[in-house]
Amino acid sequence: MENINEIIRGEPDGSVSFGDCSAQEKRKTENFDWEGDVYKVKTYQEITKMEKNGKLLLETVPGANIKNFFITEEKAQFGLEGADDVRVTMELLPETLYRIVIDGNSIGNVKSNIAGKVVFSLDTEGAQKKVEVSKN
């Protein structure tokens, strides 16, 4: 797995990559400015968490490496690498139905709770998985 040495970095396509699931101790970056938004990332083996403008966007337990994270009001997409099973929590729109697709295969629909949280798990098997979460 390729770790993000900078903890978070902007990509040429406008997305961000972040996380270091191999770190033994907590690492963080605050006030990372990217395309008009401010990001905060905390990461290590146990957890990876990213906030945008003070709002949780994504959290993984255990920690993961996230590649090319891109989000709009309709859809989020990213690559995820982790050591094993990873639980993903995203804060999206409240009480909205979302379709979860992993490597092109739908794993079903999930309705966000009143706070907008969507939770799902995936087995990375040590390889990068392509994740798409879209409004249904």
Image (cartoon, rainbow, N blue to C red):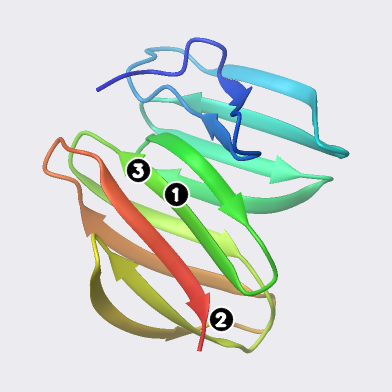
The residue tagged 2 is 112
**Residue kind at label 2, given as amino acid type:** Ser
Q: Residues within 10 Å of mark 2 (few under 14, many from 20)?
A: some
Task: Name the residue: 36% across, 58% down.
Answer: 131
Q: Secondary structure under badge 2? A: loop
Task: Name the residue: 29% across, 61% down.
Answer: 121
Quadrant housing residue 91: bottom right
Which of label 1 and label 2 is nearer to you?
A: 1
**Residue kind at label 1, given as amino acid type:** Phe
Q: Position of residue 113 (x, y in %)?
A: 59, 82
Q: Position of residue 28 (x, y in %)?
A: 63, 19
> In this rendering, is residue 43 above or below 136?
above
Task: Name the residue: 48% across, 56% down.
Answer: 77
Please identify the residue farthest to the front as the structure is shown.
13
Q: Position of residue 41 (x, y in %)?
A: 63, 30
| 47 sits left or right of 95 in the view | left
Q: Nearer the viewer, residue 73 or 63?
A: 73
The residue tagged 1 is 78
Q: Residues within 10 Å of mark 1 (few under 14, many from 20)?
A: some
| Disc 2/disc 3 C-alpha distance (Å) | 21 Å
Task: Name the residue: 84% across, 45% down.
Answer: 53
Sooner in the amino-acid sequence: mark 1 or mark 2: 1
| Disc 3/disc 1 C-alpha distance (Å) | 6 Å
Instruction: Tell me the tag on residue 80.
Output: 3
> In this rendering, is residue 122 above or below 5?
below
